[in-house]
Amino acid sequence: MSKPGKFPFMQVDAFTDSALGGNPCAIVFDADDLDNDLRQRIAREMNLSETAYVQRSASADIGARYFTPATEIPLAGHPTIATVFALFETGRPVLVAAAQTPSSIGERVVVAWNGSTETARCIALSMPFLERADAVLVLTVEGWQVPGPSGDQVTAHLRRNGISATAKHVDSGSRSVGEAILDETKEFNADLIVKGAYTHSRLRQLVFGGATRHLLHNTPIPLFMAH
């Protein structure tokens, strides 16, 4: 039996844009050493509808298990969303699976670059993928940029690190930024997108929508993301 102690956790309210609303979920990080008895005791102590435990996975970058105050449950919607949000907020990279299992991953990679700190950090975290890729496209979309290095500068940096990278700048035209990214991804025949998550303000995301939201809802290939 695991001994009680101090455990880092975050409470996230899913399905809301205001404080103290939505569906609350506690997320306990680095939970690999917690046995089922202690997980259940923590869930009872939290007394929320679910408590999520983030742990290592044999088949993915990160795994999660979910407990109510009474028992463990299988995959569920709002604790999954809360867990992914918590991982974004703590800066941990997340590999988001597509609806269908891809035949390859990381052979041809699109880096959706907009000059942001989030995307720069995401590139650094994704270097193991980029270094093994056959081809990398650094894609910038007109009107999406924030102050920061250009796509050409990022491409030059990747090339100095031995990565086969090229740069491309496109005008979205009548498309949203997310649609433009997916169109260029399809044309490049990519099997992975690297992108910083929620790089614009949440107000702008709420009013105008955002590339992150569009990609999460519509991508046909995996996304490597970090916030």
Image (spheres, rainbow, N blue to C red):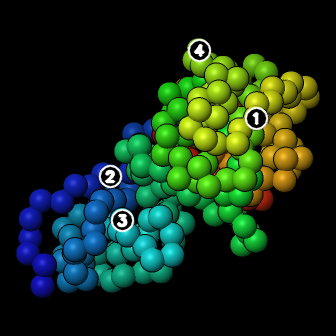
- Residue 190 position, x and y percent, is 78, 53
Residue 153 visible in the picture: yes
In the structure shown, which secondary structural element does the residue marked by tag 2 occupy?
Answer: strand
Q: SS at mark 1? A: strand
According to the image, label 2 marks what residue?
11
Q: Nearer the viewer, mark 2 or mark 1?
A: 1
Residue denoted by label 4 = 147
Residue 87, numbered label: none
Which secondary structure, mark 4?
A: loop
- Along the viewing direction, whichever of 131 and 150 lies nearer the viewer: 131
> Residue 115: x, y in percent?
60, 24
Q: Amino acid at mark 4?
A: Pro
- In this rendering, is residue 78 above or below 43? above
Label 4 and label 1: CA atoms lie apart by 21 Å
Q: Nearer the viewer, mark 3 or mark 4?
A: 4
For image coordinates 71% across by 49% down, the residue present is 109
Which-is-in-front pick, marks 4 and 2? Answer: 4
Q: CA distance from mark 1 to mark 3?
A: 36 Å
For badge 1, the amino acid type reads Thr
Image point (34%, 75%), residue name: 68
Name the amino acid type tagged 3.
Val
Label 4 vs 2, first from the N-terminus: 2
Structural distance between the alpha carbons of marks 4 and 2? 32 Å
Foreground label between 1 and 3: 1
